[in-house]
Amino acid sequence: MSRAPAHSEVTGVILAGGQARRMGGEDKGLVALGGRAMIEYAIDALRPQVDALLINANRNTGHYQRYGYPVLPDLQGGYCGPLAGMASAMAAAATAYLVTVPCDSPRLCQDLVARLDAALQAEGAEIAVAHDGERLQPVFALMQTALYEDLTAWLARGERKIDRWYAEHRVAVVDFRDRLETFENVNTPEERDALWRRMRASHAPHHTAQQTR
């Protein structure tokens, strides 16, 4: 029997700690999309779904701090991937659960946390991960912060693959094929421009062919 999502038990972290090589090294969280930094869309979408919010970033920390949320670098240096950011957030979170999202997916759905939480509780899982109907979306995940020691030990062994770490735990896979816009992300300037065109089109007013007489 699943419970209703308890947002007071969930800390959200926006992962902005990568190197963004395909963006020419530009910090993806701060890349402008429609005149706003991409991380601002993630903040707006995730903040109402959680009790506390963190930002994981390894550079431009002063800029990220302007948003008013704690900014955490990876505890393990060297750009070790999303698991390192997750570990940093687990160390800082004061809640039983942590939800993670990337900084470059500006169309997060409003029920992301609720659906992940419902599946995690119903299946007695340690981690709930989104699936788009074709593949796992591993950085859209809800997990127990009690996994911190296990994760840091995993990283200390030189492991970096997120799927391999998930395979060591009880995972609930959650179907989000009806929310595919959530996983639209940006890796290149061309993808950024194409995404903005789609976002503008989705908010354009629709006119009917019938005219008022």
Image (cartoon, grey):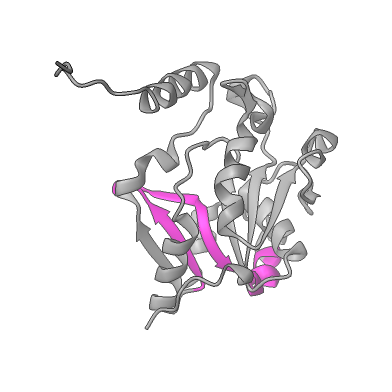
Residue placed at 41% from the left, 62% from the top?
115
Please tell me which residue lies in front, 73 or 178: 178
From this view, report whether residue 119 is shown above or below residue 108: below
Classify residue 90 as left or right of residue 163.
right
Asked if the magenta segment contains residue 129, the reply would be yes
Q: Is residue 6 left or right of residue 20?
A: left
Magenta region, residue range? 126-153
Q: In the current view of this chain or complex, which residue is farthest to the front?
A: 213
Which residue is nearer to you in this view: 112 or 202?
202
Residue 104 rendering spot, x and y as whole percentages: 56, 35
Quadrant of the frame with the C terminus: top left
Question: Looking at the image, can residue 167 be seen?
Answer: no
Spot occupied by residue 52 in the image (x, y as percentages of width and height): 69, 60
State which quarter of the image contains the N terminus.
bottom left
- Answer whether residue 81 is magenta in the image: no
> Residue at point 51% right, 57% down?
141
